[in-house]
Image (cartoon, rainbow, N blue to C red):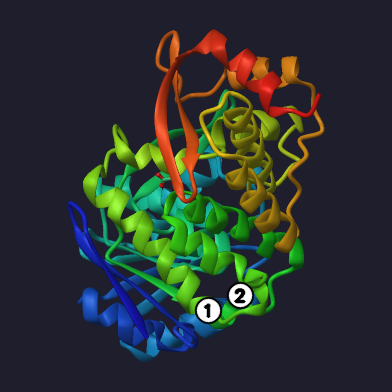
């Protein structure tokens, strides 16, 4: 088993290995002496893993309740959040009990926000069931729900007690869902130095034992989170591809999956950086290879003006400026503060003529 320590405002470990779901109860016991546990998942994951997770918790002495919500980002909203808080109260969970997120990024974000706010904070364990959630959403303590005005507009930083990446759950993910996780891993390779970038290029991610690459990505994210837990400095490097990625998601009416949008967003910003002479062509070549190898599109499918206008709505914008994450070398990116109007030129440079 690979163990990655995250010494943030609350220290915890990310465990990476096959077979962790079956050991869930015993592993939770090590970090939480509580009586009750609420297991939160969505209607897609529930038939696959809920029973197994509940039995494991029960055999470790937890009194288990469950909360299943309808699958989909559209349900990561205030109504589901309030239903969950009310379910916690009805089941009598106290501040020493345990909330457990079993699922992808939507479940982790929703359950994490409930854990951060129910009784001003109760222990949280994340058991991600998608590759994307293993390498990104479950680590680092960002939690949120969506508002009508946009994604993740209400949230909190709230670190879990434990993250369990059971790699045996990844084998059955549909190709498109797996590819979305690959996009976030490729993002890590673009930030994590030449060795990680080269290692990732050796073969498609799906054809390799997942533990080593997942742990490299989690360790990279850990290093950034520990330096900048509240996302005002270097942690923002993890937004590579996200300014134009979020714009693409918005333009597609949220039909384009997040990972695919980030993949195209990385291609846009990297191509633009090459055209502006900030980044060597070999970066774009390496990115193109990685995207193609892992079933991801570099093409955006929207025009530069539309992309620019959608990017102006980015919530990471600060007044009239926005901080872009720009590749500047093999496995290296930098933060570049730009006037928001400059996004127009970046969008034009980043799309094929
Ligand atoms: N998903 C980017 C971050 O956690 O900062």
Q: Which residue is the site of mark 2?
A: 170
Q: Quadrant of the N terminus?
A: bottom left
* On screen, residue 11 above or below 276: below
Dot 1: element: helix
Horizontal relation, residue 20 to residue 222: left or right: right
Q: Quadrant of residue 7?
A: bottom left
Q: Secondary structure at mark 2?
A: loop
Going 26% across and 76% down the picture, which residue do you hit?
A: 35
236 with respect to 130 (left or right)? left
Which one is in front, 48 or 201?
201
Give coordinates of residue 97: x percent, y percent. 27, 66
Q: Quadrant of ligand 1?
A: top left
Label 2: how many Cα within 10 Å (few below 14, some 14–19, many 20+): some
103 lies above or below 289: below
Tell me the quadrant of the picture where the C terminus can be found: top right
Q: Please name whichever residue, 54 or 170, is drawn nearer the observer in this view of the structure.
A: 170
Q: Are discs 1 and 2 less than 8 Å apart at CB? A: yes
Q: Nearer the viewer, residue 131 or 47?
A: 131
Residue position for label 1: 167
Task: Name which residue lies at 53% across and 23% down.
Answer: 314
Q: Quadrant of residue 60?
A: bottom left
């Amino acid at each position: 088993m690979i163990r990655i320590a995250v010494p943030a405002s609350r220290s915890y470990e990310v465990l990476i290995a096959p077979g962790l779901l079956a050991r869930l109860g015993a592993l939770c016991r090590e970090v939480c002496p509580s009586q009750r546990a609420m297991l939160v998942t969505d209607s897609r994951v529930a038939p696959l893993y809920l029973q197994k997770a509940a039995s494991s918790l029960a055999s470790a002495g937890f009194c288990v309740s469950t909360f299943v919500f309808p699958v989909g980002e559209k349900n990561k909203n205030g109504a589901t959040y309030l239903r969950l808080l009310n379910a916690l109260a009805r089941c009598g969970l106290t501040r020493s009990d345990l909330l457990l997120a079993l699922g992808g990024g939507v479940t982790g974000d929703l359950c994490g926000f409930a854990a951060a706010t129910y009784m001003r904070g109760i222990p949280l364990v994340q058991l991600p069931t998608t590759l994307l959630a293993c390498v990104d959403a479950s680590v680092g303590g960002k939690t949120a729900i969506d508002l009508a005005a946009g994604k993740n507009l209400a949230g909190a930083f709230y670190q879990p007690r434990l993250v369990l990446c059971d790699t045996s759950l990844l084998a059955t993910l549909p190709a498109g869902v797996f590819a979305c996780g690959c996009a976030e891993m490729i993002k890590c390779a673009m930030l994590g130095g030449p060795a990680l970038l080269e290692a990732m290029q050796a073969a498609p991610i799906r054809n390799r034992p997942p533990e080593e690459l997942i742990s490299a990505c989690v360790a990279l994210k850990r290093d950034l989170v520990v330096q900048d837990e509240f996302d005002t400095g270097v942690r923002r490097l993890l937004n590579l591809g996200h300014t134009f990625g979020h714009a693409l998601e918005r333009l597609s009416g949220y039909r384009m999956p997040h990972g695919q949008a980030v993949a195209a967003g990385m291609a846009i910003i990297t191509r633009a950086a090459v055209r502006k002479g900030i980044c060597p062509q070999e970066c774009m070549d390496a990115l193109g290879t990685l995207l193609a190898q892992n079933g991801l599109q570099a093409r955006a499918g929207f025009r530069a003006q539309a992309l620019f206008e959608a990017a102006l709505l980015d919530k990471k914008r600060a007044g009239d400026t926005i901080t872009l994450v720009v590749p500047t070398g093999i496995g290296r990116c930098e933060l570049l503060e730009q006037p928001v109007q400059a996004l127009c030129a970046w969008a034009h440079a980043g799309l094929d003529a």
